[in-house]
Image: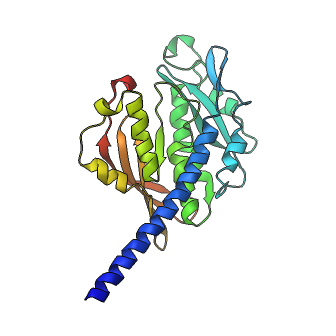
Amino acid sequence: MKKTISAILLIFAAIISFNIIHGYRYQKFVDKISKYQSNAELINTNGNSDIDSASFNLQEYFRLFDKLGLEPGYKLSCFYFNGFLYGRPVLLALKTGVSIDSLISAFKTVDPSLVNDFENDDIPYEFLTYASEHLNPVDHLIVEDSRMGYFQLLVFKIMGADYGLSGHATSSSIICTKPVALGVIRGLKSEGHGNRCFSKSPRLQFTLNGTCPVCRFKKNICTYEILQFRENAGFVRSKYIVSRTFPHQIMTVSSDTLVHYYCKDLL
């Protein structure tokens, strides 16, 4: 009986060590993406904000996702959307030879009196819907069939366009280690937000102890459970299913807010 218990404990310890090691590998990649994103600076062009190409190179940025590649015949592109309350980049997968300007021009309102005052002068809101449904780069990414490959795909989906944000645009940080989770809390407390914005929840310690992404492979799919900190929600654990064949479909199975974060400054 004692030998059985010892064997179980050794297996359990090995699993924990394996997850912790991978957690730090994942976090190293997330930190590399976040560091490059922090380089992005905004410039004013004709009264609208845009990403300064001198501070942020889209192609160089995408090369950081070294386990991902674009479907042949497509290129990664981007435009900066200036909304009434926020501004953020929108990533697109365009067929080679197609320009953003030619696509956007088809959505422009001919009669200026019909243009919503809250719209970007150059990019109608209708184009955002079209881009999301038909030009989403995630639909055209070829992924290395590995843990890191599918993790990079989810990082691209969750926070790939979280750079150069303005106004009330919010971001989502992927958390893979306990020290990073603690760092988020300390940072908010140092700004005077932590104590009054985090809900008092017994799940906080559980959250901190369960930071490592959990990956499970099956025949045709892999599942990932990932902890995020969302500025407009708190600590959220989401479960995703990713198909292992191209095109790689991503389905969000669940999204559970473990510890709520309330901050009026973000409203």
Left or right of 138? Residue 118 is: left
Q: Answer with the quarter of the image where residue 182 lies.
A: top left
Is 130 or 69 nearer to us in this picture?
69
Is 190 or 199 nearer to us in this picture?
190
In the rendered view, how is the structure colored? rainbow
For residue 216, say whether it is visible. no
State the count of labels: 0
Is 18 or 230 nearer to us in this picture?
18
Q: In which quadrant is the C terminus drawn?
A: top left
Q: Position of residue 8 (x, y in %)?
A: 33, 80
Left or right of 217? Residue 185 is: left
**Most extreme residue toward the top, as rendered?**
113
Residue at image x 47%, y 53%?
Answer: 176
For residue 104, say whether it is visible. yes
Q: Position of residue 74 (x, y in %)?
A: 70, 48
Q: Answer with the quarter of the image where residue 54 lies.
A: top right
